[in-house]
Amino acid sequence: MAILDILRYPDKRLRTVAKQVDTVDETIKALVEDMFETMYEAPGIGLAATQVDFHQQIIVIDVSEEKDQPLCLINPEILEEEGTESCDEGCLSVPDIYETVERAEKVIVRALDQNGDEYTLQADGLLAVCIQHEMDHLKGRLFIDYLSPLKFQRVKKRLLKQQREDQRQLVM
Ligand code: K1U
Ligand code: ZN
């Protein structure tokens, strides 16, 4: 197993649209294991393959308190969605920024698990938010894309300041 590097905004590779997985073979299974390890270590509650520079439709999630409910979604498809809800979101690719985003409140999603078996999941609350956030990554979309131009400018300023501080610490 390995901890993978997480791409950070504004890296253009985060804008890549992921391709469908043809076969859940040993290479995909190993990548899923590495993605779980990377997500738990970060720590985060989700991770999309796009964020670790693999452009295939693979997501790992664990929104449980005990970190004992791992979920893998390969080639996820939203079958139904219902309602809307606003939730504060963060992103491992946009560190230290938390902003409110409106999403569907409930989703029904079909996907393959890490063994290649198809399943359907009904999700609400944080799990529904996280699934939609991660599926956006697979389309090259980030949660900050939903912000108003004014909020986006403020976030960009904070990110630039952060990057300057990170660079200063690297030099020292
Ligand atoms: O996609 C990602 O970058 C992961 C992201 C998922 C997410 C968080 C919040 C709302 C929607 C999607 C994160 O995990 S950010 C870190 C985070 O939320 C967290 C970290 C440690 C403990 C609890 C939460
Ligand atoms: Zn994210």
Image: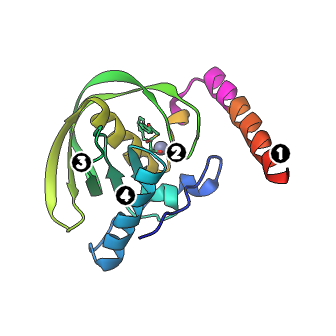
Q: Does dot 3 land on a helix, a strand or a loop?
A: loop
In primary-sequence order, the first of circles 3 and 2 is 3
**Viewed as shown, does residue 152 lie left or right of 84?**
right
Q: Which residues are magenta?
A: 145-155
Q: Nearer the viewer, residue 41 or 28?
A: 41
Q: Does dot 4 land on a helix, a strand or a loop?
A: helix
Write down the residue under mark 2: 92
Query: How would you classify the magenta stretch by its main secondary structure?
Result: helix
Are the two marked residues, 3 and 4, in contact with CB atoms closer than 8 angstroms? no
Q: How far is the residue under mark 3 from the one under mark 4?
A: 11 Å
Write down the residue under mark 4: 36
In primary-sequence order, the first of circles 3 and 4 is 4
For badge 1, the amino acid type reads Arg
Measured as percent of width and height from the top left, residue 1 is found at 41, 70
Write down the residue under mark 1: 168
The crowding category of the residue bearing disc 3, from other C-alpha atoms within 10 Å (few below 14, some 14 to 19, many at least 20), is few
Whether residue 155 is situated above or below residue 116 in the rendered picture: above
Q: Is mark 4 within 8 Å of ligand 1?
A: no
In primary-sequence order, the first of circles 1 and 3 is 3
For badge 4, the amino acid type reads Phe
Please state which of the two labelled residues, at mark 3 or mark 2, is closer to the viewer: 3
Q: Residue at x 56, y 60 (%)?
A: 5
Are the two marked residues, 1 and 3, in contact with CB atoms closer than 8 angstroms? no
Residue ranking furthest to the right: 172
Write down the residue under mark 3: 69
